[in-house]
Image: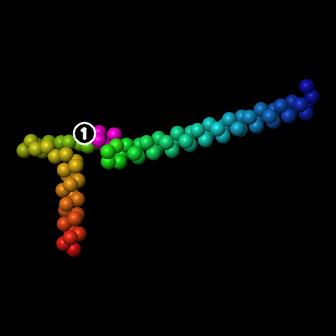
Amino acid sequence: MTLEERVEALEDFMGKMNIQQQEVEAVREIVRKTTNEVIANARRPGGLLNAAHNQAAEFKIARSSQSIRPNDVNAILENARLNVISNA
C-alpha cells in the first residue's frame, strides 16, 4: 500500500467517524427535546407529574385536622383574583 493509499484510507476512516459523531449528536438532541416535552406535558394539568404532585401535596392543618388540597387553594386564589378584577 502506497503512502497516498494510506492517506486516502485514513481520510475515508476519519470521514466515517465524523458522520457517526454527527448522527450521535442528532440522536442526543432528539432525545433531549423529547424528554423535555414529555416532562412539560406531565407537569401540565391532567399530566402524571401534576397529579402526583397534587396527591402528595395534600396536607393536614395541625389543629383542626381539615384536609386542604392544592386544587382547593388554587380555586380560592382564582376566586380572589376574579374578585379583585371585578372590584377594580
Circle count: 1
- The amino acid at mark 1 is Ala
Q: Secondary structure at mark 1?
A: helix
The question of residue 88 being in magenta is answered with no
In the rendered structure, the answer to whether residue 17 lies left or right of residue 81 reads right
Q: Quadrant of residue 77?
A: bottom left
Residue 3's spot in the image, x, y percent?
91, 31
**Residue that appears at 85% across and 34% down:** 8
Q: Which residues are magenta?
A: 48-52
Badge 1 density bin: few <14, some 14–19, many ≥20, Cα 10 Å: few
State the residue position of label 1: 56
What colour scheme does the image use? rainbow
Q: Quadrant of the C terminus?
A: bottom left
Q: Observer-nearest residue: 33 or 13?
A: 33
Give the quadrant of residue 82: bottom left
Give the percent coordinates (x, y) of residue 14. Answer: 76, 35
Q: Is residue 63 left or right of residue 57?
A: left
For the N terminus, which image quadrant? top right
**From what the image shows, is residue 56 above or below residue 88?**
above
Asked whether, in this view, residue 8 is left or right of residue 57, the answer is right
Farthest residue, direction front:
46
Residue that extends furthest to the left in the rendered view of this protein: 64
Prevalent SS, magenta region: helix
